[in-house]
Each structure stands twice: as C-alpha cells, then as structure tokens.
C-alpha cells in the first residue's frame, strides 16, 4: 500500500516507464521529505486486501471501492477491500474454522482478507454445516447484516460470528496473488498481502457507507482506461494488480493462472521527479 494521496491522476501517469504521482496530488511537504529520509524506516504493519471477481458480459470484472475524502489513508482513491491484520485474525481457533487456506502466507493474512471483505462489502466467504454457501439464501441476509454490524462496531470477532451461526470460512476460491511493502520513505507503512476471491453465486456486494463513498464493478481493462483518463483515481499497487488481471476470459482462468505463480515481495522506491514523485519497482521484483 502506498500512503501518498492521489486525488486525481494527472495525464500522463507514466513518464519514461516510471509511475509518477503529480506534485499537486501529494500531501504538503511529502516530496521534500524524500530529500531528508528517516534514519530508521517505520516498521510496516501487516495488512491484507482482496480483489473480488465475478464473470461479466464483457469478461471478468473486479470490485473497486472509493474511500471517503476524509479517510486517513488514500482518501478518494478506488481500492480493493482490505485493512490491517488484527490480533484476533491469528487466533488458532479461528484458523480451525477455515477451509482451503494455502501454504503461504500465514493464516492471519487469509482470515484478515476474508474479514475485511465481509466488513466492507457484506460478502462473507463461508459455508454452512452442509458445506453450502449461505449467500444465495434470502433468509440469511438479516442475520448476516447483524453479524457484519457487530464486527464493524467491535462487539464481536469473526470467530464469534462463525461459532454463533454454525459457519466455516471458505477460502477454496481465494488465491494469494501479490505482496507489496510500502516504500521506506513513507511514515505510514504496510506489509500487504493481496488476494483474489471469486464472488459466490447469489452474493451481492454492498459497500459500508461509513468508510466508502462508491462501489463499482469494471473489467480490469475498463478500470485502467478510466484511471488513465483521470476518472478513477487509484494508487500504484491497485493499478499494477489490475494490469496483471488483463487478458483473461473468465474468473476461473484468472484463479487457475495465479495458483501456479510464485509470489515475491515487492518493495518500491520513491524518487523525486520534475512532475512530482516517481515510484520505481526493480525489474526482478515486478509482478
């Protein structure tokens, strides 16, 4: 995740192969801080994010949520559902309620990704005691809404929700796809694991209006087109993830492809440019 503000990308966004955040879209003094970097970089906080995918008439579509302008992190940007990994996400009892977890990263990143998707979209990737998805059943909607509100109000943990409703987390259609670390020059840093998740049949996403001001489904190609036109503000890891999702015919094809890929950590560098601040990813780190 990148902490710099990106209200509306100026055109062009790329200069000489470098992704550039225009100076007018940066917080006051941000560019100048690069001239005097901190002696010790801030320790990145663990975080998870998940791109929800569905098959659409023009190909696979991805859900993007717009953060409120008053948000403390990338205000106004379109992002995937996500946030910090909490201590409760690492509870071994919660992990025991999960099916389909991959060998990496640590289970807490997976459970955090599923929790954030539920909190921010209302989509709970879970099955009932019979192994069936609960999202297509109209009778489950009120109790899921209550559980979501309890999570958001911190009156319950995800483990509480699963135990009280007789559910299990279902990560069989969740795939680990990227690992981004915020550049060392930024004061707010995250160690973020990116996932892809298929939207279950019958599920509908509903953004939490307290954190998000908009929710849109676009093909990756259309989202990038709108971004380059200055109509869909996004930060670099989101853009890079969308670029990696282009050219596929179905969600199944995307998930199959990424299941076979090796995920390497990516730690971009920030450099001053005449236009603002450039983001550089070394060739051997590129996704």
Image (cartoon, rainbow, N blue to C red):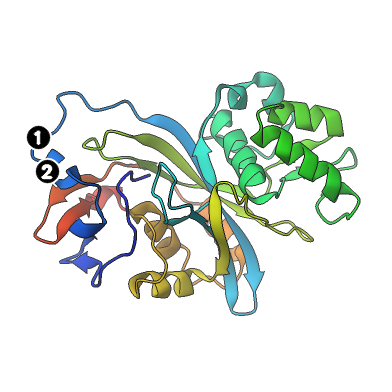
Q: Can residue 252 be seen in this view?
A: no
Residue 192 position, x and y percent, is 43, 39
**Residue 232 in the figure: left or right of residue 99:** left
Q: Quadrant of the N terminus?
A: top left
Numbered badge on residue 36: 1
Crowding at dot 1, Cα within 10 Å, few <14 / some 14-19 / many 20+, comes out as few
Crowding at dot 2, Cα within 10 Å, few <14 / some 14-19 / many 20+, comes out as few
Query: Total number of numbered labels?
Result: 2
**Residue 247 in the figure: left or right of residue 31:** right
Residue 89 position, x and y percent, is 60, 27
**Residue 45 in the figure: left or right of residue 145:** left
Disc 2 to disc 1, how far (Cα)?
7 Å
Residue 145 position, x and y percent, is 77, 45
Residue for point 32% across, 25% down = 43
Residue linked to disc 2: 32
Q: Residue furthest bottom?
A: 58
Residue for point 28% across, 27% down = 42
Residue for point 55% across, 61% down = 214
Q: For residue 188, what is the image quadrant?
A: top left
Q: Can residue 87 be seen in this view?
A: yes
């Amino acid at each position: 995740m990148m902490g710099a503000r990106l209200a509306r990308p100026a055109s062009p966004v790329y200069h000489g192969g470098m992704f550039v955040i225009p100076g007018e879209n940066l917080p006051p003094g941000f560019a100048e801080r690069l001239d005097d970097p901190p002696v010790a970089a801030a320790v990145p906080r663990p975080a998870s994010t998940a791109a929800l995918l569905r098959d659409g008439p023009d190909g696979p579509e991805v859900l993007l949520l717009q953060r409120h302008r008053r948000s403390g992190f990338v205000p106004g940007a379109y992002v995937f559902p996500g946030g910090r990994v909490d201590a409760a996400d690492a509870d071994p009892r919660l992990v025991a309620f999960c099916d389909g977890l991959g060998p990496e990263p640590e289970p807490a990143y997976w459970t955090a990704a599923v929790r954030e998707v539920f909190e921010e979209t209302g989509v709970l990737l879970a099955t009932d005691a019979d192994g069936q998805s609960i999202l297509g059943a109209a009778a489950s909607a009120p109790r899921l809404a209550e559980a979501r509100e309890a999570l958001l109000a911190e009156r319950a943990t995800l483990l509480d929700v699963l135990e009280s409703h007789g559910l299990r987390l279902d990560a069989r259609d969740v795939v680990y796809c990227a690992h981004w670390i915020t550049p060392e020059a930024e004061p707010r840093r995250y160690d973020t694991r990116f996932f892809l998740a298929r939207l279950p049949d019958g599920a509908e996403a509903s953004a939490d209006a307290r954190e998000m001001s908009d929710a849109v489904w676009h093909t990756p190609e259309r989202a990038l087109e709108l971004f380059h036109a200055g109509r869909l503000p996004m930060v670099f890891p989101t853009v890079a993830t969308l670029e990696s999702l282009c050219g596929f015919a179905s969600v199944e094809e995307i998930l199959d492809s990424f299941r076979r890929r090796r995920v390497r950590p990516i730690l971009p560098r920030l450099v001053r440019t005449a236009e603002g601040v450039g983001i550089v990813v070394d060739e051997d780190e590129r996704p």
